[in-house]
Amino acid sequence: MDILSEALASMRTGQPVSVRTSGSAPWAMSLPPVSGSGFHVVLSGACWLTPLQGYEGEPVHLREGDVVFLRDGCGAILGDHPDTPPQVPHDAEFAPGAPLGTVRVGEDGGERADLLCGYYHLDQARPHPLVSRLPRIVHLPAADTHCPELTAAIGLLRAELDRPRMGSAGIVPALIDSLLLYILRAWHERQPDRSAQGWAAALADQAVAPALTALHGDPARSWTVQELAARAGLSRAAFAKRFTELVGEPPMAYLTRWRMTTAARLLRESEAPLAAVATRTGYGSEYAFAKAFKRAYGKAPGGYRRELRAAA
């Protein structure tokens, strides 16, 4: 069981949205907040990113090959310099292209920067802690990120965007989709101290990681802390303390969270009857499941599904 893949799949509510951005100095563009997580990849050149919405840090200098991931989709300004007044792009500026349109900012002749900008549709109402406990802004400098897979994915993206050919319309979305996994893998693997608290440590821990795999693999099972502790070779108290420190909540609280997350995904992506969803998430009756789901999501599972269908 791949915990990272499962966590992201549980949060996805749609396909990634992206556009190629070409800036020629002096240039700057203001990007509004999105209901998901934003990302920017510098394909060539360099630029500055200034996050909005009360971000207190300094502007981030991005160079060729750099990637930045905006965890909660906060708005941002991209430009050749933090002091350049930004434009607000309009739909009319998106020129048709294959496989992506391009928004152009600035005057021709200045120093250029080419980027791939976009966002992932991720449910931020109940984000998985693997994502919610990330820094608000994840910056992966090309020079410091020892992740050849991420570098290769960016190279493949640039090649397909620079020279669209047969199959590019299918290859580019798949690469952008995979980019999210590479970004999060690169961030977790570059954490300096795996023994510290947090998910980077949890996914590497010899006691906690197998427990997470077990809970994700069979959420319907009537797990107990004692059973999970025995699998880890620890006492019940030692295991519970270790799990809580690394994951951020006790084992049974995490199990309930994962059951509800799994249920919401089944309601979104399948036509399974509510009784079947209840069984697959460990509830002996539809009533008990509906009560737990309403406690977590503020609405009954049937109403949750109807709202999603109406909004689609």
Image: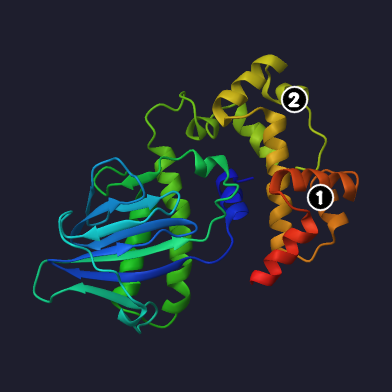
Q: Foreground: 150 or 284?
A: 284
Q: Residue at x 24, y 71 (%)?
A: 22
Q: How is the image coloured?
A: rainbow
Residue 20, quarter of picture: bottom left
As drawn, the label of residue 280 is 1
**Residue 169 image position (x, y, % from top left):** 44, 78
Q: Mark 2 points at which residue?
A: 225
Q: Check the picture and name the quadrant holding the C terminus.
A: bottom right
Rendered location of residue 58, percent (x, y): 23, 42
Pick whichever of labels 1 and 2 is earlier in the sequence: 2
Circle 2: is it few (<14), some (14-19), or many (20+) Cα within 10 Å? some
Q: Farthest residue in the left direction? A: 109
- Rendered image quadrant of residue 123: bottom right
Q: Which label number is shown at residue 51?
A: none
Helix, strand or loop under label 1: helix
Residue at 38 percent across and 60 percent down: it is: 153
Instruction: Identify which residue is drawn at 66% across, 21% down.
Output: 240
CB under 8 Å between callouts 1 and 2? Answer: no
Per the image, label 2 sits on a secondary structure element best described as helix
Image side of residue 3 versus residue 153, left or right:
right
User: Type of residue at label 2?
Assistant: Val
Q: Left or right of 209: which side holds 155?
A: left
Quarter of the picture holding the N terminus? top right
Relative to residue 304, is residue 297 depicted above or below?
above
How many numbered discs, if any?
A: 2
The location of residue 85, given as percent across then percent down, is 18, 62
3D distance between C-alphas at marks 1 and 2: 20 Å
Mark 1 neighbour density, 10 Å: few (under 14) some (14–19) many (20 or more):
some
At horizontal 78% and vertical 66% (from top left) the residue drawn is: 271
Tag 1: residue type? Arg
Q: Position of residue 129 (x, y in %)?
A: 55, 40
